[in-house]
Image: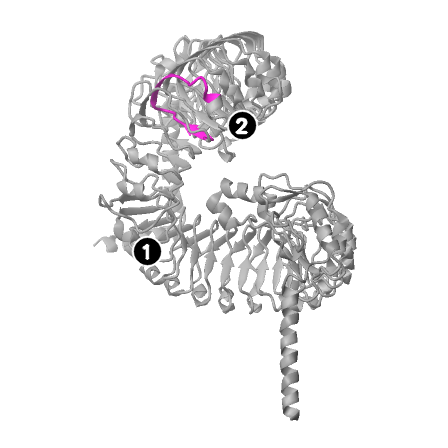
Amino acid sequence: MLKSILLVFIVVCFVKTIQFGLSVNGSSLHCPQNERSALLDFKGGLIDQTNRLSSWVGQDCCKWEGVICDNFTGHVVRLNLRNPFPLDWDRYYDSGRNYDKTYSEACLIAVGEVNPSLLELRHLNSLDLSWNNFSGIVIPKFFGLFLELSYLNLSSAQFGGIVPHHLGNLSTLRSLDLGTDHLLSTSSYNIPSLVANNLHWTSTLFSLRLLDMSGIDLSNIPFDSFQTITSFPSLLELHFSDCSLGKIPLFHSNPKNLTSLTILDLSHNFFQGPIPSAIRNMTSLKVIQLSDNQFSSNLTNWLHQLKSLNIIDLSYNSFEGEIPTSFSALQSLEELHLDYNQLSGHIPTSLTKLSALQVLDLRNNFLSGPIPTSLGTMSALTELALDSNQLSGDIPLSFGKLSNMKMLSLAFNQFSGTVPDCLGQFSQLTELNLGSNQFQGVVSGLHFARLSKLKYLDLGMNSLSIKIQSGWVPPFQLKSVSLESCVVGPQFPDWLQTQMDLDTLNMSSAGISDSIPNWFHNLTALVQLDLSRNQIYGKVPNFTRNMVELYLSSNRFEGSFPQLPSGLLDLDLSNNTICGPIRADIGYTVPDLRFLDLSENSINGTIPKSLCKMFSLSLLDFSKNHLSGDLPRCWGGLVNLEVIDLTSNNLSGTIHASFFHAPMNLRTLHLGKNNFHGELPLSLKNCTSLSILDVGDNKFSGVIPTWIGKSLFSLRFLRLNSNKYNGNLSRNLCHLKKLQVLDTAGNNLSGNIPHCFGSFNAMQFNQTDFVGVWGIGIYKDKLSQVIKGRELEYKESLRFVTNMDLSNNNFVGHIPEQLTNLSGLIGLNLSRNHLTGCVPMKIGQMKSLESLDLSNNRLSGTIPKSIKELTTLSYLNLSNNNLSGRIPLGNQLQTLYDASIYDGNSELCGLPLKKKCIRDEAPRTPTYVGRRAKGKQTGLTGDGDGDGDGDGFITIWFYIGMSWGYVAGFWGFCGVLLFKKSWRKAYSVFVNDMVDSLF
């Protein structure tokens, strides 16, 4: 009976429990009205662009998106409004601007302050507002009143100002994330910055397991402030990336309480010197992230003691020496990132002992030698990046065993041999980059047999021949492919038409002699296309509207100017045979264009005024066409222009002052070889970043503006030649310390050459020591110069050119001795002036001089002997002056055997002229160096330094002296034998020994 009663009681309790549970989860249990109202008030202060909060209607807020309630009380305990599309490196790389846009549109945007109504959520233990846009407002102080919070995530939410110390009240916090992701902080967004003046407020957060303050400016925290962090015994993750901590002494006392730390991220700071040795005490570390600092010296020899390490990232530092073999002791290591350092030596074979290693990244170092064959035994390897080193040899055949390989990058090395077809067995491979090596041979369909997951393929800049049978259907769908400088043609490969996901295609210099096939229209995902430097013919087709970058230079495209995709950013149609005018509406159809190169075509007509609507334009190159008319005055609004090149057209008119009325980023201005007249506008001085100013071969007149030397301090190349400038050269030009080329030839300039022209710093040093990037994108700056008597266009080598050409003017006076200070000058041309006096005695100091032309002046005196010290001189013209005396010989002058370079100097004598100098003996047979060629004169050898008198008097006394020396030497020796008995015996023995040895 008792058992029955007990059984009934249990059944009744079970039923009541079920009923209670149903009532809790059913419609009878709602969130409290005050919490519902608080959430709606909070929503009212947000802009919800994509209606993420559209479910926030009705009475029960527990059913709303991002709101989680307690199952028994109905109180709101979690609020998760994290952006569902946070910026992610992999997805950002895959989708680029589209993914960037998706993230931006999904952001909740704050309007004004965060509504304090949230304080009604008294039971809240988790708050996540990450990856939204709170418009730079400060983190609300009332967040410090959520005393039950254990999780607070405000990362990448675009808060600004000073981090409130009130957060120190949250003593139950286990996870505090205030960081800003590095991808977001380096993107195009204007991200507000958070600042912390100290970290002492964190001392009460005893329960912390995770602390992330990445991207917060900590540069001004007290030195002891960071030590507060090291006192947390339970801390597992510490993220202080991009905090400007370089001047803060980390761990100046041993962080003994951080023995539980598993993740340490100090990347993107400015730390210098060796890695802090205190880190060796963090024995539980699994991840150490120290990338993008300035750590230097050899790689530390104690890292291998941290046996639990799974990930080591020391990339983007200045570590030197060899990779330590001791790394092989880290048997748990899964990722090793040592890229972008200065490591040298070979890849140690000991790394192959790391059986768990999945990622090995050694890019951008100075590693040499072959890839160890034993690397093929690392079966866990999924990513191997060795690009941009000095590695050589073949790809080991053992690589065929790396069945888990997802990414293989060997680009920019010196690998040779053929590409092994075993790479075609990497069924998991998504990226294969073998570009810029010395591979040769044939690549066929076998190389891609099982690469069904391949997305990125780069075989460019090798000597490979791509031979794939017509009709081949690839197993992959590529997103990007580069076959630059491979033999692909003569026809377009038909397998490309199957690649519907393709967004980047580079087949420049691929030997294609074909028209663009019709199936190109079907590649609708294509955004970047480079077919330059082929022999592609026909009209430029209408490409898909998604096209962003289009490079078709150096082909045989013809016909009128094409219709362009509206979203185009870069267009290069240079060096084709496009004819007719530029479309008048170009500025409206492609308003976002940044790069426009139409040079070296047959384009005529005027420059469209609609170009003034291209406010993003940074490069404009219309050079070497048949354009005519004036320049549009409205160009003054194109403040992003960096390069304007209009060289070699039929443009005319004046340069209006409005052209440069606003400060511009202009670095290169080419207006040469046109019909412009008038004066350069004063507004040009606003272009203070100008590096190249080329207005040569026009009809500009007046005095060379003095403001050039007062304002354009960045000028390196100034070309004013073949105009109608008059007056004196302004001494203000001497302020242009960076000037490498000064060309005022062919004007009506007069007066003296300023002595301060010898103070151009850039002409005093050899520019082969200068490393710089000229131009933007694929554009390379260029400049025409007359050096060695020929006009050449310098492009790739422009940064090495130093030249001063003041020829064909009316300059008078002496050549300033100060010009000989320009020891880095390659060319000096002062010809066709009215200069008098002597050739500077110290001319030999100009050690880099290759071309010297002082012809057609009134110079007198002798040619200085120091001229023979110009060991690089290959062009010399001193003709038509009043020079006299012997022509110096020796060194490089021996190769200048064209007598015409001294013509018109009646008082000069000596070789290579037929006129002998006074007191010359009968002609001696000269010994010539090199071969005779037109305009080249060999010099004499065996005549001392080549510039002595060389007359018969010295020759006679030479032979007289030699005779007396022989007589004195012979009788001196005989006299010693006659009077010295010991010498006679020794000599007799020596003679007998010699006779015996002969017989």
Q: Nearer the viewer, residue 372 or 256?
A: 256
In the picture, measured across the screen, residue 286 lies left or right of residue 171, that is: left
Give the structural element (helix, strand or loop) at label 1.
Answer: helix
The amino acid type of the residue labelled 1 equals: Leu
Q: Which residue is mark 1?
A: 423
* Horizontal and vertical percent position of residue 169: 78, 59
The amino acid type of the residue labelled 2 equals: Ser
Within 10 Å of the Cα at label 2, are there few (<14), some (14-19), or many (20+) other Cα atoms?
some
In the picture, measured across the screen, residue 931 lies left or right of residue 201, that is: left
Q: Residue at x 64, y 19 (%)?
A: 710
- Is there any visible trace of residue 789 in the rendered image? no
Q: Quadrant of the N terminus?
A: bottom right
Rounded to the nearest angstrom, the CA distance separating label 1 from label 2 is: 43 Å
Question: Any mark on residue 616, and which?
Answer: 2
Please say whether residue 465 is one of the residues in the magenta stretch: no
Residue sitting farthest toward the left: 999
Q: Residue at x 76, y 54 (%)?
A: 119
Labels 1, 2: front one: 2
* Above or below, comparing residue 614 to residue 285 in the picture: above
Q: Residue at x 50, y 41 (%)?
A: 98
Please say whether residue 579 is one of the residues in the magenta stretch: yes
Q: Nearer the viewer, residue 777 or 911?
A: 777
**Which residues are drawn in magenta?**
568-587
Within 10 Å of the Cα at label 1, are there few (<14), some (14-19), or many (20+) other Cα atoms?
many
